[in-house]
Image (tube, coloured by chain):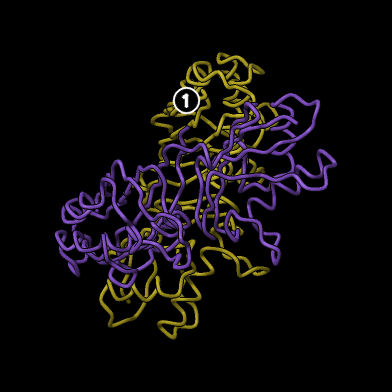
Chain colours: A purple, B yellow
């Protein structure tokens, strides 16, 4: 069996997220497994992603790997998959790896971007990739607040997954908040999160919390109280999926 | 009656172009006229655009005007329209003009952009706004060819409208070809056309001709032969609608 690593892009709008589900075939993982099953004739090809993305979340550089028995070159495998993928999913690179490579277990660092279109006007062209928010955000306050999240912390207040007994400690290396501005003064804000890994819903809850700071509903220094014994209800709302994009996974 | 000028954005994918048609209500003009009819109670509000855009063509700055009898402020008119528009159309500004202002007759200059994604890989996120072309284009040759089109010429070989007895002379002020490049060497090419006006299909046929130069099927200096007594069959193919966007109209 040969082990292939692929880098994938998708617009998440139409999908029920990354993870295969019994009740729907409309998942990214499900699409890949169906195509590779067809290509190889294997009953079940398991395609492991670097992590699950939620329904509606996009990916510019999701990484996955799978083991198959084939005579094709890596480029032929990639062409075959792309030929059967719909127009909102694409494999952009492929590489044969050693047999122990695993896209999730070996991931060292991930980058996510969250985009906010901060304007009373809708964004016709980018509407599927941005969260549209009309009230003006105080970006400096958001930057101040974001710095409290950087570092190694217990982020259990920032996940929707209550049952897991696994560690909720993660390290965020950086959070950068940048924006471009239209001549009318509307801002296209991008929050870039860089860390060793993120819990279920973590980036969206961090973003929801930063938005509440930007709206003046919380003060930056209040972020300190959201670690240690904090609970989910103390952190901010879950920001909408469509503003989120998994940019890159590093190994 | 008050005369309002509006600037409009739309993603043209779902529409049969700008112009109202009897057989379909799915036109941009038709959407506006229906909303304004509802708002004013007038039987027929005519919304004049600066020009028709074809089915599938986008607009970042289309201009239109209409005359209505209303007590609303311009901002209230804009908010009313935006409230009833679908998410792929928006009014981004409004201004009350003198009664003789006409968006088409008074237009002095227009800018169109045509985008080509020059890569063997699909473009997942921008796929509705770019023409995807896998064969590598010679951009320097395209730039050389474009310079022959700049200036005042008879562009009758560059329009699909055979019947019109109107003048086919137009002045192109500039054609700029720029691109950004991914790390894999794929180019996102934008051709920007600036002129006093463009004939039916003219930008798409100019683009189709430049693409044939970029593919090595024509030489830049052959462009000289496409004026004067040239006919439509001597110019290049009609480039696909989805790469085209009306950027700005100046008065």
Q: Is residue B123 above or below residue B66?
A: above
Which residue does the image show at 20% across and 60% down from the upper left? A223
Splitting the image into 4 quarters, where does residue B74 fall?
bottom left
Q: State which quarter of the image contains the N terminus of chain B.
A: bottom left
Farthest bottom residue in view: B41
- Horizontal placement of A33 versus B84: left or right? right
Q: Which one is in front, A175 or B206?
A: A175
> Looking at the picture, how far across and down is residue A156, in whole percent?
35, 61
Q: Is residue A209 above or below residue B192?
A: below
Residue B130 seen by the camera: no
Q: Which one is in front, A239 or B67?
A: A239
Which residue does the image show at 66% across and 42% down from the upper left? B162
Q: Which one is in front, A23 or B106?
A: A23
Chain letter belonging to callout 1: B
> Looking at the picture, how far across and down is residue A71, in whole percent?
81, 25
Farthest front residue in view: A165
Callout count:
1
> Looking at the picture, how far across and down is residue B73, in whole percent?
25, 76
User: What residue did someone put label 1 on?
Assistant: B183
Residue A34 seen by the camera: yes
Q: Which one is in front, A27 or A166?
A: A166
- Horizontal placement of A153 versus B122: left or right? left
Q: Residues within 10 Å of mark 1 (few under 14, many from 20)?
A: few
> Looking at the picture, how far across and down is residue B98, in whole percent?
26, 65
Splitting the image into 4 quarters, where does residue B99 fall?
bottom left
Which residue does the image show at 34% across and 56% down from the upper left? A116
Farthest right residue in view: A41
Secondary structure of the residue carrying numbered label 1: loop
């Amino acid at each position: 069996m040969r082990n292939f690593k692929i880098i994938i892009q998708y617009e998440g709008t139409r999908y029920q997220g990354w993870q295969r589900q019994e009740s729907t075939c409309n998942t990214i993982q499900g699409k890949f497994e169906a195509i590779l099953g067809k290509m190889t004739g294997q009953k079940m090809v398991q395609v492991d992603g670097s992590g699950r993305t939620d329904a509606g979340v996009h990916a510019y550089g999701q990484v996955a790997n799978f083991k198959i028995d084939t005579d094709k070159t890596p480029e032929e495998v990639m062409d075959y998959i792309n030929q059967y993928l719909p127009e909102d999913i694409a494999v952009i690179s492929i590489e044969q790896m050693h047999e122990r490579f695993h896209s999730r277990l070996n991931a060292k660092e991930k980058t996510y971007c969250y985009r906010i279109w901060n304007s009373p006007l809708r964004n016709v062209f980018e509407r599927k990739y941005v969260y549209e928010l009309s009230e003006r955000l105080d970006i400096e306050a958001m930057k101040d607040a974001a710095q409290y999240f950087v570092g190694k912390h217990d982020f259990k207040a920032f996940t929707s997954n209550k049952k897991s007994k696994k560690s909720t400690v993660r390290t965020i290396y950086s959070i950068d908040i940048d924006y471009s501005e239209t001549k009318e003064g509307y801002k296209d804000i991008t929050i870039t999160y860089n860390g060793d890994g993120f819990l279920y819903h973590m980036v969206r809850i961090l973003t929801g919390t930063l938005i509440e700071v930007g709206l003046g509903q919380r003060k930056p220094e209040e972020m300190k109280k959201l670690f240690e014994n904090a609970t989910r209800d103390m952190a901010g709302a879950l920001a909408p999926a469509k503003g989120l994009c998994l940019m890159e996974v590093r190994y």
